[in-house]
Structure formats: structure tokens, C-alpha cells
Amino acid sequence: MATPTPLNALKLMPFRMIFNRIYALIYVFAIASLLYRHVQTLLSSTAFSSFLVHAAMLAADLVFAFMWSTTQAYHMRQVTRTEFLENLEKAVKEEDFPAMDVFICTADPYKEPPLDVVNTALSVMAYDYPPEKISVYVSDDGGSELTLFAFMEAAKFAGHWLPFCRENKVVDRCPDVFFTSGYGTSLHAQKLKMMYESMKERVEKVCERGKMNEEYITNEQERLAFENYWTPGFTRQHHPTIIQVLLESREDKDTSGYPMPSLVYISREKSKTSQHHYKGGALNTLIRVSGVMTNAPIILTLDCDMYSNDPSAPKRALCYFMDRSVRPNLGYIQFPQRFHGLNENDIYASEHKHIFQINTMGMDGFSGPNYYGTGCFFWRRTFFGGPSTFVRPEIEELGPDYVVTKPIRAPEILELAHNVARCNYEDQSDSGWGYKMGFKYGTVVEDTYTGYRLTCEGWNSIYCNPKRPAFLGDIPISLGDALNQNKRWGVGLLEVALNKYSPLTYGTRTAGFIMGYCYTHLAFWPFWLFPVTIYSYLPQLTLLNGLPIFPKASDTMWILVYAFVFIGANAQDCYDYISTGGTWRRWWSDQRMWLMRALSSYLFAAVEFVSKQLGISNQGFTVTSKVVDDEQGKRYEQGVFEFGAASPLFVPIAAAAIINLAAFLRGIGLVLGGGRGLDLFVVQIFLAGYGVLNSLPFYHGMLLRSDKGRMPTKITLISSFIALAIYISFSFFLGN
């Protein structure tokens, strides 16, 4: 039913929509003509080696065409939205706001510093929202006493921090951000800063030692909390469920007498004999534990490094949740992932603007955006089957409509919470956790897969992108971490693309063709490996061997077609990037990293995926490090690539860089030597030059740097040897 006052507004982009559709139609004819030329050339090949070369180029362009076609699904109906916060309390009284459970997951205290996780929790505990309606659940899959200690310290500090934020209308409610920004100049703020620094020092000392000591325990409650960790035989791989209620809104008050949000620490039982399902398993455990304790109708999921940057974010979500006329089957509100600390040119393209902003605008024009793992508000009901196909959980206490009447510290509540957090609980349940209910299993990218399956079940979503970012997260500041993160995503996306629920088949049937095609683009992302690898090596190798494979420069019509295909795709991409607040330099970094990911991350992702399918290897889930080294940080701020530790992920890119440089120099030699070099090889010389331009950071790292972040000599030598071996092998292939 529509609300009496408008809570939100939708804006279409008719000009962009019409332009994109006309452009797509013209581009289809250009692609079709190129494919036609490929087939003609292939059929007229006389030598077997030439036939294979042109067949490879045809295959590359077919995959390029397929992937390009999936990107156009995002351009068919892009929309933007606006929320009217000033109207919310006119439509809904604050006491009628729904309660909210916040899920924060962490897994490794050495890669995800406990103090960072604490800052994330404190930032949401301080929301501009009734505190008694907020419950924060922290899942610690690292089973770390360091993290528990940090949250015990945070619970004490929160009693002072929350009233300070409320009384002073603080906007930056992440303590670390506030105190390092220079805002806290008042006497009260300075006193609070001293308290924060004291807490920070205590937590960092404990983390440096790597173990809690009894000297840091200040009361009996803390002693009991750590008792499990000091039990003989306790290990991170095998330990019982640990649930600690650090704050309860019914009992705990802040220094101003207001109720505190509830804060619960959970370390689920781990056993080598049970599947844990990585983050998806942790989130499903939180659904069950929170269901027993508070069972709030709204759930917010957050990465441990993604702090709240806007205290009004829950109210923005309510502007859609409270207006069911927007989308009757609304399941969740997704805020974009935004990041702090990006350098001027975003050299590793960590902003991922296409995924989190550009493409999401297009999905919102139909059924709504995908779920991106963080910054997302759900109706709890969404996790229990489709809008018209409710899946009943095994016990009534886990149902989305169950009303909790007992305090969360009640013995029977804690006993049931421990029970539903057991490692074998799902094995003994026939309700289908991870398959029919909750976050979906079967891939390490549980976020993408869950959002996709929810769309197939009939749920819709909303993309909420306010001017002030609602959440800000950390980014990798070394090339190795950036590539490894994308490799992990690549493995998970292949698991989505190539299972029985593939978006290309199942998705287009159940979610609608456009939405299915949007998810197809996401899931088939690693397939960029094939065309990018072929275009990074084959034209250059043929140039080195004097074999033209593209139209001559004098063949004006075909040269113009090739130019239109290349320039058209890049121009549309650049326009999308800049029109959503990007810069030209950041767009260049984005397309450069796209090439590097395809050459490296997706190659290793494909190898790992195949190995897992064959049962040869399963490396499991790798947490991206959020720890920042000072020297690395300085180089990142200066826009200098960080190679540092030797990684096999660098080898395919470095080898391609060497071959492209050799081919470009060979092409320049042919042009300067006179004859028909430019006429015959203009496209190949251009591609080699384009490769060289994108490889400049690698040449710099291999040849011109002496700092610790330079390319390791071992990687340079291995890459040079592989490049030489590829050239010799290809020359031998052509000669035979």
C-alpha cells in the first residue's frame, strides 16, 4: 500500500537508454561483419598453421562478442533513485521502526586486525536509529581470543562513544576516522580520544603478543569469557561453539542512560569432519543464532572492514522497505561498495565501478541489483523461500515471524543458540540450509550466488546510492593481493557459471532474459581469459614472424570496421565510467587491470577450478590481507605498482609484456625499413603498442626500480624464459 507521503523517487534516463539501444544495434552489425570476414579468411587458408591461427582469432572474437552482448543488458534501462528522509517519520513513527540485526564476519585476526573489525561494529552501533532496536552479531571464524578481547574493550568504550555521537550529531561515527580527521577539538572529544587511544593500545599490545594474558582481565565476566580459549587441546581448527553476550539492550545503558545496542560475539564450532562453507556457512549460523536471540525482521550484512560512513543508512533503507508499492516482492536494499584510501588514479582499479555502480544501475531498471556481500539490508523473510513458496525451518524459533520474549542472556536462549551453531547442525537438519534456505552454498562467492538465486525465486531488490557513501571499506594496496582477490572471485564465478543453475540457461528462464543475461555477465567474467590471452599473444607472435593476419591499411573499409569496434567499445566504457563520477585516468587504470586480471587471475582461477572438479586440489578460502605496511602505503599513494613478494600471478602478465615489447620494436623496424610494413601490419603494430602502453608499470618494475616493491628478479627471469620459449615454439609451429 502506498505511503501517504513520498519516501522515494525513481528517475529514468531516456536519452541514455535510446542512445545505448541504437549504438548496440549498429555495433551488432559491425561484429557480424568481422565474424563474416573471419570465416571467409578461415575458409581460404591454405596452410594448416594459418588455418589454426585464424580459427583462434575467430574463437576469440566469438567470446568477445558474447561477453559484449551480456554487457548490453545493463544498458537497456538504467535508473537512479532518491530517498526523502524528511518524510520518513511523517509516514512511520520511530517507535514503529523495525528492529535490525547486523552481521559482521571476520576470519583471521592477522589479516583482518581486530581493531578494524571493532571500528566497523562501533560505527553501526552508533546509527541514527533507536539503539534498543539494533543487535550486532560478530562471527569470528578465526576463533581468536584476540578478537574477543578487542570486542570486550569496544563494549566498554561504546558506552561513552554512542552518547557522544548522538548528542553532537557526529556524521563520521567510525571512531578511528573521527579521531584522525581532526574534528574532535572540544574538551569532551579530547577526553574521549584519550579513552579510544587507551583501548587501541591495549588491543594492539595483545595482538602483538599473539595471545591473551590474565593481566589484561579486569573482571570475572571477562575471565569466564576466556575460559574456553584456555581449555587444553583448543585449536583454531577444532573448538566448541563460543557465544558471548557482551551487551544486551534490555539491561545495559550508556553513560547518558539510553539503552545500548545488543552486541554478541560468536565463534562457531569447527571440526575437520564437517563442512563449514566458508563465509556462507558463517552467515547462516548468524541467521539461526540471531533468530533464537532477537529475530529482527531486518538483517544488515557487513564485511569486517566496511565501516558505516552515514548514520542515516538504515533510514534510507526504510524509505523503500516501508513503501511496498515500489516493489511488492522487495527482498533487499543494496548499497554500493565504496572505498577509502584510493590513490588518485586507483592503479589497481579497486573501486570496481562497473560492478558496484554502472552495472547495478542497469539491473535496478528491471528486477534490481545483485547482492554484493556487504552493505545490504534484507528482510529476514527473504531467506526462507520465495515470496509465494515459504520454506518452514526445522524449529519454530528460527521462523522469520517468531517473536522472542526472553532476554538473550537467559540460559535456555543461550543453550538453544549454542545448539543451532553446532558444526553438524545443518547435517542433522532436513530443512535445506544453504540450498533452500539462507545464504546459498556451492561456491566461494556466496554473495553473487545468493543474490542470483533470490532473483530466480521471485525476490526483487533496490539499488540505493546516496551522494554520501553509506559504507567505506579497505582496498588491497599491492598488485599481488589485488590479483589474488580476483583469482578467488574467478574460481567462485566459474562455480556459478558451470553448475546446473547456470544464469545462461536456468537464469534466463526463471529470472527473465535481461536479468538472466546480467547474471550471465557476472558469472562468465573469467571467460575474458580466452580472448584477452589470444589478443595479447597471437597478433604479436605473428608480427614477430612476419605473418599478417588483419586487413591491410589500404583496405579502408575493414580498417574502419575494426577501428569502430575497438573505439566504440572503449568509448562507451569510458563514458559510463566518467558519467558516474570517475576520471579518465581511473578509467585507464580500470581497463589496464581488466587486461591483467584476464591474463593472470582468471588463468589461475581456471586451473584451480578444474583441479577442484577433478579432486586434485582444493586450496579453500583465502582472506585478503587488510594489514598495511608503511612503505607499501607510501608507494601506493605515489601511484607506484607494488610487486614485492614473488608470485606466479605476475608471470603471465610479465611474459605478455615482454612479447608485446619485442613485437612493437619489430613493427617499428618494419615501418622504418620502408616497404609495405605499415600497410601489412598496421593492426598488429597497434595491438603490440597498446600492450606496451598497458605494460609500462611492469617494465618499470622489472628494469628501472631498486626499492623493495620492485619486480622480483626471479619472476623477471622466469617470465623472460617463458616468453622466449613461447616465441620459439610458435615459430617452429609456423615453420612446420
Image (spheres, rainbow, N blue to C red):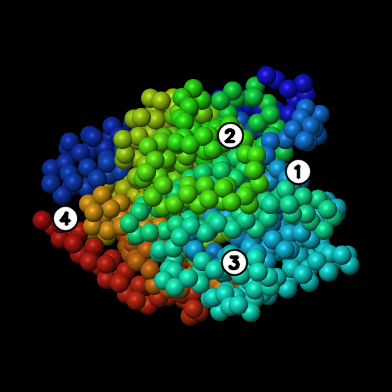
Relative placement, left or right, of 154 versus 259 is left
Label located before the other in sequence (2 or 1): 1
Residue lying at the far right in this picture: please name it: 187
Task: Say which amino acid is labelled 3.
Answer: Leu
Identified by mark 1, the residue type is: Pro
- Using residue 205 as the reference point, say whether residue 540 is left or right of it: left
Task: Give how far apart the Cα atoms at labels 4 and 1 are.
Answer: 73 Å
Q: Is residue 186 left or right of residue 98?
A: right
Residue, disc 2? 402
Quarter holding residue 56: top left
Numbered mark located on residue 662 in the image: none
Q: CA distance from mark 3 to mark 1?
A: 30 Å
* Residue located beneath label 1 in the image: 130
Which type of secondary structure does the marked residue at label 4 adopt?
Answer: helix
Q: Mark 2 and 1 residues: CB-CB less than 8 Å, in contact?
A: no
Left or right: residue 553 compared with residue 636 = left
Q: Residue at x 62, y 35 (%)?
A: 403
Discs 4/3, front: 3
User: Which of marks 3 and 4 precedes in the sequence?
Assistant: 3
- Closer-to-camera residue (659/465): 465
Where the C terminus falls, by quadrant? Answer: bottom left
For the residues marked 4 and 3, what is the alpha-carbon distance in whole angstroms? 73 Å
Say which amino acid is labelled 4: Leu
Q: Secondary structure at mark 2?
A: loop
- Label 2: how many Cα within 10 Å (few below 14, some 14–19, many 20+): some
Q: Nearer the viewer, mark 2 or mark 1?
A: 2
Identify the mark nearer the N-term, 4 or 1. 1
- Between the C-alphas of marks 3 and 2, the distance is 31 Å
| Mark seen at residue 734 | 4
